[in-house]
Every structure is written in C-alpha cells, then in structure tokens.
Amino acid sequence: MPERVMFTMGDIACAEGALSAGCKYFGGYPITPATEIAEWMSIRMPEVGGAYVQYEDEIASITSVIGASWTGAKSMTATSGPGVSLMLEAIGLAVMTETPLVLVNIMRGGPSTGQPTKGQQGDVMQPKWGSHGDYQIIALTPASVQEMFDQTVQAFNLSEKYRTPVFVLADETVGHMRERLVIPAKKDLKLEYRKLASGPPEDYLPFKPGDDLVPPMALLGSKYQFYATGLTHDERGYPSDKEHVQIELITRLNNKIIHNADKIIDVEEFMLDDAKIGVIAYGTPSRSAKKAIKDARDEGIKVGMLRFKTVWPFPEEQVARLASQVDHIIVAEQNLGQMYYMVKAEAAPTPVHLMAKPAGMPQLPNEILDKVREINSL
Amino acid sequence: MEKAAVSIKDMLKKDQILSAGHRMCAGCAAPTIVKLMGMALRGPTIVCENTGCLEVATTIYPYTAWEIPWIHVAFENAAAVASGVVEAMDVMREKGRSEDEHVDVIAIGGDGSSFDIGFGAISGMLERGHDIVYMVYDNGAYQNTGIQRSGATLPGQETTTSWAGKVEPGKRQRKKPLAEIVAAHKIPYVATVDPYHYRDFIKKFRKALEVEGPAFIHAFSPCPRGWRSQTGKSIELSKLAVETGIHPLFEVIDGEEWIMSSPSKNLKELKPLDEYWATQGQFRHLKDPKWDDFKKQIRDQVSHDWELLRKRCGLE
C-alpha cells in the first residue's frame, strides 16, 4: 500500500492504524464514543481478509480477542469506560497468559453511564489498577488524529514484543475530532511480531522466558503442545500453588515491563529548555496547554510542557528530571486528579499544582494561561 | 386494585405513566409501548430500566417523563436490580415498613440489553422465580449507539455493523428466538405483543402482572430512524410484522401451554415478506435479484417457524 492521506476522525484513524499494524481480528460491541471504530472495522476487515465479529457484550469481545490472538492473529477490541469495567477480569487473564492484544478505550465521562458523548480522562488509573493482583500494563495516550494512528501501530508493536495487553487511552475529543491523517506506505512502517516458539517440540517450555523475560509463543494449532491458564503456572504452563512459583511468575510478568520501561515510555518535551514552570498534560488538554504556553512565553513567562504519550509505565524519570529543573509543576487533566498523584509522589519536594476539570470540555488555553500566570506570580 | 384500561374510554381516564415532552424520535414506538404498559397497571409500580434509547430520551437532564418510580441501571442488569427491589420490598412488608400491600416491579430493556448483554441477568431472574415482569421493547438493533446489529436483528437487515453491499445482504444470522428461550425456563407467563393490537397488549401485560412469579413480554417496536421507515407508519408496520409472521402474537403458560393470539390466529395465511421489506430502507438492497436465493431462505425460515408455532399452539 502506498502512502494515503485522509481527513478523518480519531476513531477511524485508530482503526486504520490497527489495519496498518496487521490487525486481522476485531471483536466488538457497540458503545459510545468508540462505536465508529467497530463500524469502520466491520467495513474494512473483510477487505483485508480479516474478521470483524460483534459479540453479545464486552466480556465476550475481549475474551474472543484472547482466543484469536492465540491463533497468531494480531487482535484487538475497542470500547469505552463501562466496557473496560466489564473487561477487567479478562485483562488480568491476558496479562497472566501473556497474550498480545490491543484494547482501545475512548474515554467518556464516568463513573457508570456518566456522559457517553462527552470526553474525559477519568480512566487513566483503571488499566493499571483495575484488574486484581499485581501486574504492570502499557497504556498510550494519543492527542491527535495522527497519533491515534501512530500510537495504535505502536500499541500493536509493544503488545507483540512484550506479549502483553496494551491500552490506547484516548479521550472522546481525540476520538471524535477530525484532522488530516497521513497513513504511511506499508514499507515505511516498522512492525513487530511476537517471538514464536522454535526448536524441537519435546523441549518446548511455553512459559520459559528469554533474556528479555518474554517467552516465545506457540500458537494454537501448531506442532507445540502447551497449556495456557489464568492459574499461577510454572515454565511448563502447569498450575501450581507453590509459593516460589507465584513469586517467580508475577515478578517476571512485572519485570518484563519495568525493565523495559525506558524503551516503552514516550514523552514530548515542549519549550522546556529554560522553563521554570512545567505543565504536565496528555491527550486533549495537552493541545490547549501548547497554545497557553506559547501565549505565556509571549508574556515572558518561562513555561514548557512535558506531555505524556505513555501513562503506563509511568514516566518516573522524566517527571523527576522535570521536577529538578522547574520551580513549579502544573498537572492539567480532564478528571479530578489522577496522574496528579503519581506526579506529586515523583516530583517531591517541587510543588505540584492540580488543574482538574472532570467534565466534557477540556481546559481551554486561556484557563491554562491564567493558571500559569497565577503560579508565575507566586 | 386498579382495573386495566382496555377500552378507549377507560384509557383516557387512566393516569399516564409517561408524560409528554420526552425526547424520543418522531415515530418511535417505544413511548407508545410504555403508555400501553401503563394502561395495564394495577397499583403502585416500580420500573427498573436498562440503558437504551428509552432510558436516555425519557430522562434528559433536568427532566424526566416518568410519572412513576423509575431507576436507571447499567446496560445489562435491570433484571438483577429488579430482583433486589422485589426482595427488599418483601422484607419491608414483612417488617411492616411498607405502606403498600403490594408493589409491582417491572424491568425494561431494549433488544440489545435483553437479547445480548443482559441475557444472563434475565435468565437468572427467571430461574430464581422473582415476581417481576420483564418487558423487552425490540427495535431490532442497537439504535441508541447508532444502529448496530443485535441478536434481535433480522436476517437481511442492514445495520452499521452488518452492512449490505456487493458481497453481503446485511445480517445473515437468524434472530434469536428470545420469547421461546424464556418460555423454556418454564416460567408462568410469556407473551408477544405489538402496539397496533393495543387491547391484546394491555390484556397480556395485565396477565403478566397478575401471575405469581416471573413473566416476560416481548414488544415489537418500530424505529423509523434505524429502519429508515416513515415516521407516520410505525403502528401500521407493527401490524404488518404480525401479518407477515415477523412477529407472531402468542402466549406461553408455564412454558408448556402455547396459545396463538387472535390477531395471528385469524390470519388465513401470512402476507408476503416483500411487503414488509418494501416499507423500510434497511431492506432496500434486497430488491437486487442477486439476493433472490437469500430471500427465499428467509421466507422459508419464517414460514417454517410459523408452521412450528401453529403446531405448538394446536392449530394444525
């Protein structure tokens, strides 16, 4: 496929990103404001020889994705907060069975039904802490239509590389905004595919990791006999109630993300060189922040932004570095303060100011500018 | 106990449970269905409703169109919430803390929340035997999120996730026979209704309230927005759905005794499905002769189901 240009919405860019990444299976269920992804996939999947299947609920959609992924197909689902709430058990299952999959959450107002047609960033803690047990997760936060595409490709790459579920966390504004999208030619995309089992089948240990802590995967229907389970299992995949097996397994599952965090984490530094005030934002508020920062610079205020393109693993080092440089940090997020607490813990003793807005309309540039002025006058 | 209002005269006198000014689309049959349900009520009633068009559009902040106690739950669990309500009301009554001798509890869901995501909750409610009337208003797709296919979508129906085009004729799978599945739980009462046959509707709903234990009402509910039908034709479409065998009217008592209702029983033969398809944009593609074989399959299926139903109702 040569390069293509579209003028389209974030949800569709996400679907196109998945297709460009080689996604061949989409298990879906309607939910505002993510339905367009499913609708687009229902048209496009048959065109690329993949499968779009609509399920009876979100629990079925995500578990079908787990099943599909084990056959070797790059697989995904897309939903919104209430759907993710139903999927949480399966996310733990995907973590435990080391199943590569991509889960898109187009975030709307919550809790519960909330404000289905309004954007919010109330679900940024959910991927990390929603399922039970100790686990690490990867979650990306695009802020434009182009990034909906790029980061969905990236989500597939990370999920394949680390054999783990990866979230794309986009607020509704990003999901529904329309912008120019450039879909690169296939040859220009760097795509990852899971490391597959090799060697004699009799020697194969399905959960014996390589140096990167990721075990090579055998696919359903291949010559390798294996057993995948949500129970704590040893390298053979067999369930175990032994203390050391539990400790070894969950430590490795966590470490395969933690030890590679520097390769996974992606941030954008904007006008930070000489900044004395650092704004931290992600998704739509980061776009308001850019405008606010330019305006503040015109007034001579030394302000810049650290934009999270990854919220999980949390960009600890980047925040610590920012905290050592600036006098104040402002966290602008479309919720009552979620990343704020992570930033606060990491930035101490640098003061961190929360600019919370748990509503559909993100912080406006002039609102962020006012906050920057206020902090600058302290 | 209040009487059901079956005649027009009585209907005009009975308090409406849904006020004017709700925001349902023009021509939507769901508010009519709720109003007919209201005609059957016998006293204090609580409604638990799943997420769906009816829930959203009757309660847009800061208003509600509901004149009786009403609770919105999540997408899939009106049957479970209603079970909790029934249990708690029983306890309150036993303790002498309820002024009402009896409170009827009704759970309502659209087809998405009843045929698909909330199916398990309904089955659980039926098995537990909770004294609840569950009513599904079936408009054949997830209309609230923008017309996606559901387990109630008919074969040949085009939705935004079951497209019609060069290679596909819309949804290929058959519609889930929900009323039959519910009846298989051997519950006291199951009935199918539609808003055209309003007397039949009200009488059946009243029976559903009166039986001890769970009852299930499957209401056919045309949706001009999703079906691309004329807004003034929804009630006629309901009639046509009965006449073509898309939505036959029947009752099932205790899961065993099948009774064909008069509007269906009096049909000499079913009207051709093409008449039904011709009324809706969502079936427009079926005019293409390349779908002739597919249409024949649907016709055969509908007439097979019809014959089977007649047999069950002892009408051979």
Image (spheres, coloured by chain):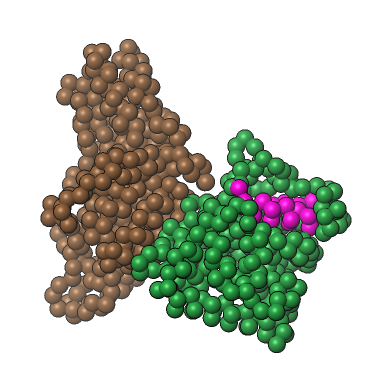
Chain colours: A brown, B green
Q: Nearer the viewer, residue A236 or A308?
A: A308
Q: Quadrant of the N terminus of chain B?
A: bottom right
Residue A11 spot, x, y in % from top left: 35, 48
Where is A327 relative to B238, above or below?
above
| Residue A239 visible in the snapshot | yes
Question: Where residue A170 sits: x, y (%)?
Answer: 35, 43
Q: Which residues are magenta?
A: B26-47
Relative placement, left or right, of A41 versus A87 is: left
Disc tally is 0
Instruction: Answer with left or right where residue B263 lies relative to residue B153.
Output: right
Q: Residue furthest bottom?
A: B316
Q: Nearer the viewer, residue A215 or A183?
A: A183
Residue B223 x/y as whole percent: 58, 56
Q: B134 left or right of A21?
A: right
User: Could you say which quadrant of the image residue B124 lies in?
Assistant: bottom right
Q: Is residue A111 in sight in this rendering?
A: no
As for residue A72 lying within the magenta part, the answer is: no
Using residue A125 as the reference point, say whether residue B25 is left or right of it.
Answer: right
Q: Is residue B211 above or below residue A36?
A: below
The C terminus of chain B is located in which quarter? bottom right
The residue positioned 74% from the left and 56% from the top of the image is B36
Name which residue lies at 60% across and 58% down: B222
Task: Based on the picture, tell me whether residue B43 belongs to the magenta stretch.
Answer: yes
Please give the name of the residue rendered at 22% of the width and 38% of the height, measured from the top-left corner.
A267
Q: Nearer the viewer, residue A76 or B191?
A: B191
Across and down, in percent, residue A50 comes to 29, 66
* Quadrant of residue B2 within the rendered picture: bottom right
Residue at x 39%, y 46% (from the top left corner)? A106
